Image: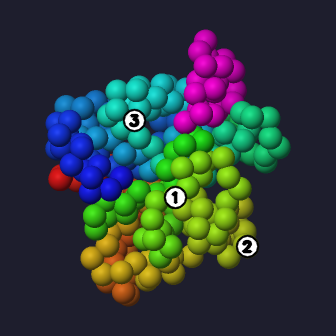
Amino acid sequence: MTDAATIDLRRRGFTGLRVVGDVHGDAVAFSHAVAGAEAEGLFLLQLGDLTDHGPDSPAVLRLMFGLLDARRGRFLLGNHDHKLRRALLGQRVNFAAEGLGRTLAQLQAAPDGEALAQRAIAEVAVAPAWLRLGDRLFVHAGWHPGMLAGPPAPDAGTRKPDPLLSRAMFGQVTGRLQADGYPERLDAWVDRIPAGLVVYCGHDRRSPDGRPFVLDGSAGGRAIFLDTGAGKGGHLSWVDLRF
């Protein structure tokens, strides 16, 4: 999404963006985000991780695909989206029963589950790994200076993660596991965001109060984390950005 994309969205009547954090199968909350964006004339940009954990991942996919068809929204490539595609293709992946396992069971039980699965395979394949819009950059997990050099590969969702794609989907990790079983993550990348650039991301549930978490870096840039636990006992968060 470039400045030209902003001009195109304005011409099509959009007044700004609604940037939505990790959904993780929370279809009711996502439906409110979608309805509100339409009422406000906002293009909806979801930061990745549409499915897993929550009660109705198929309904989330239906909503997102409806936005794509209407050209009213798009989603970025998250690590859960990437893994879902691999699993649907029959590739060997490790997953938790309450995470991807729940999504696969929900798709199997849904009347349109097979159609949703095939559409997910196609859409995740072409989901952008990051998008830049002027002094704002949108990515699922973590930023890297290489993202300023240009857009990601158009087929990032089909690729084995290289260092840049890995940062986009997983953030910055040490390779060690924490006591809770999740990878140990670092936020040193925030200090490399240049002054004037704001990075909007999800992936890490950092908020201490249920609101998006803001972290300023030493170089003058800023990261805003929008994952507030939707589908995992928390709620869905979003921010509205006007053109």
Secondary structure type for disc 1: loop
Q: Position of residue 196 (x, y in %)?
A: 27, 76
Position of 142 with respect to 193 (left or right) is right
Secondary structure type for disc 3: helix
Secondary structure type for disc 2: strand
Mark 3 is on which residue type? Answer: Phe
Label 3 vs label 1: CA separation?
26 Å
Mark 2 is on which residue type? Answer: Arg
Mark 1 is on which residue type? Answer: Pro
Q: Are marks 2 and 1 in contact (CB under 8 Å)?
A: no
* Span colored in magenta: 103-123
Q: Residue at x 59, y 48 (%)?
A: 155
Label 2 vs label 1: CA separation?
27 Å
Q: Residue at x 67, y 60 (%)?
A: 161
Tell me the mark number nearer the camera, choosing from 2 and 1: 1
Prevalent SS, magenta region: helix
Tell me the mark number nearer the camera, choosing from 3 and 1: 1
Residue 118's tag is: none
- Mark 1: few/some/many CA within 10 Å (<14, 14-19, 20+): some
Q: Visible in this render: residue 210?
A: no
Q: Residue at x 60, y 42 (%)?
A: 125
Q: Which label's residue is closer to the chain start, 3 or 1? A: 3
Q: Visible in this render: residue 18?
A: yes
Residue 176's tag is: 2
Q: Which residue is mark 1?
A: 152
Position of 96 with respect to 140 (left or right) is right
